Image (spheres, rainbow, N blue to C red):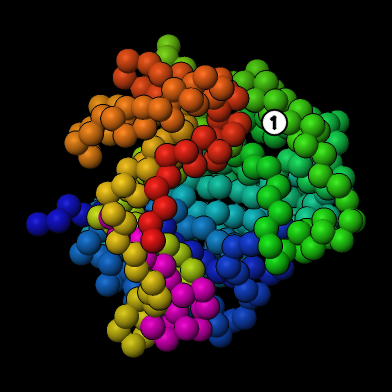
């Protein structure tokens, strides 16, 4: 009998406004479409039920918190009927403008125990520049509402490298966010994805990308967050309560769902545009809400592609993901999973990476240096095997 899959990602594609930088699949809120999505999502979850025994659930988007109380009640009732029991980590992404006391209480009572709130910046001009619908004041208000509802595990998302953002603005945002004393902090460099307004503005010469400034922002992110009591355990992620003496142990408030991704664990996914990975097979849902609903309501799941990854691809992805975390590549775990020691596969590459100061070969691990974590994607690419 197959082992039940321990993680579930659910994509809620609706937003009230498309942000300037966002390349994720989303669409504007339409009441009839949302209701159809909720019904279809519950239908897909019922199909997945027997294959799941989730220890982590993550609602991403889009803006999951934009759903109404009644829609959330429908989803929660559906999930409670699955017999999954209490979920150790259940995250819902929220926009500060869509958090209400009633919604926060409903989610908490329904079993959600972690909130990830998209702040991005505490500067009013930059929030407008990014197309965010919330204000600085709403961040404080929503954080207070979430605490009042009993949420003891809150992540705050930030962005750096935003056009018009200087070091002073960035430091002011960091200091303000640190003072809120959330359990977790994520901070991502702006990526200029094709077909986003920011990408086209950059290409048109509306602004320049200052790599030196971005580097200074990343360095100050680490320095100031560490001084504020956060422990960096992944390229863009920091958490409190590092109780171990080892700097490589995962802190208490680290996001277990994302760690499962970075350790190449199996996870199911539901909702339009979502991707799942189970037993070496990657499946992609259609990036269209109407077509997704059609697929589920006709007895399917709205899956449009399926790819079986051959062992070299699985091994390369495992190694590449591992190099995003300061724990690095665990030789014992890798050998238990694949039957090979990593040095048998990538001995030359690992020595080359080490010679450039990007990682260190130890007895049991291949760990990225701080510089290696800054360029984790480039380091990881040296392990990737491209499948035809």
Residue depicted at 49% across the width and 68% down the height: 273
Residue depicted at 71% across the width and 54% down the height: 192
287 inside magenta stretch: yes
State the image quarter where residue 129 is shown: bottom right
Looking at the picture, does residue 5 appear above or below residue 213?
Answer: below
The quarter of the picture where the N terminus appears is bottom left
Residue 183, visible in the rendered structure: no
Q: Is residue 53 left or right of residue 174?
A: left
Residue depicted at 64% across the width and 56% down the height: 95
237 inside magenta stretch: no
| x, y percent for residue 384 | 43, 45
Q: Which residues are magenta?
A: 280-295
Of residues 274 and 311, the one drawn nearer to the viewer in this rendering? 311
Q: Which residue is mark 1?
A: 218
State the image quarter where residue 293 is shown: bottom left
The quarter of the picture where the C terminus appears is bottom left
| x, y percent for residue 179 | 69, 29
| x, y percent for residue 36 | 48, 82
Residue with the most extreme top position: 245
Which element is circle 1 on?
Answer: helix
Residue depicted at 64% across the width and 62% down the height: 23
| x, y percent for residue 218 | 69, 31
């Amino acid at each position: 009998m197959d082992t039940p899959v321990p993680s579930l990602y659910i994509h809620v594609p609706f937003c009230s406004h498309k942000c300037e930088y966002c390349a994720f699949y989303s669409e504007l809120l339409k009441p009839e479409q949302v209701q159809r999505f909720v019904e279809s999502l519950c239908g897909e979850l019922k199909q997945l039920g027997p294959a799941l025994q989730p220890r982590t659930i993550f609602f991403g988007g889009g803006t999951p918190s934009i759903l109404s109380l009644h829609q959330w009640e429908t989803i929660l009732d559906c999930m409670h009927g699955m017999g999954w029991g209490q979920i150790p980590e259940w995250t819902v992404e929220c926009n500060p403008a869509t958090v209400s006391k009633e919604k926060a209480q409903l989610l908490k009572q329904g079993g959600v125990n972690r909130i990830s709130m998209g702040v991005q910046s505490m500067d009013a001009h930059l929030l407008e520049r990014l197309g965010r619908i919330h204000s600085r004041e709403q961040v404080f208000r929503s954080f207070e509402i979430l605490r009042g509802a009993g949420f003891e595990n809150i992540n705050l998302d930030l962005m750096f490298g935003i056009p018009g953002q200087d070091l002073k603005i960035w430091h002011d945002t960091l200091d303000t966010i640190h003072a809120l004393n959330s359990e977790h902090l994520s901070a991502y460099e702006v990526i200029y994805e094709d077909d986003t307004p920011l990408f086209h503005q950059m290409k048109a010469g509306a602004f320049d990308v200052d790599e030196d400034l971005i580097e200074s922002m990343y360095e100050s992110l680490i320095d100031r967050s560490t001084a504020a009591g956060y422990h960096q355990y992944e390229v863009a992620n920091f958490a409190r309560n590092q109780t171990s003496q080892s700097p490589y142990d995962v802190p208490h408030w680290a996001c277990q769902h994302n760690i499962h991704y970075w350790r190449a664990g199996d996870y199911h996914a539901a909702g339009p545009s979502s991707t799942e990975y189970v037993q070496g097979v990657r499946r992609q849902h259609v990036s269209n809400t109407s077509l997704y609903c059609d697929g589920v309501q006709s007895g399917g799941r709205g899956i449009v592609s399926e790819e079986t990854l051959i062992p070299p691809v699985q091994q390369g992805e495992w190694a590449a993901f591992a190099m995003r975390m300061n724990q690095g590549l665990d030789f014992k775990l890798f050998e238990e999973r694949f039957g090979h020691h990593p040095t048998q596969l990538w001995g030359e590459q690992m020595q080359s990476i080490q010679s450039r100061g990007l990682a260190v070969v130890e007895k049991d691990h291949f760990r990225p240096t701080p510089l290696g974590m800054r360029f984790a994607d480039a380091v990881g690419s040296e392990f990737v095997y491209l499948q035809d």
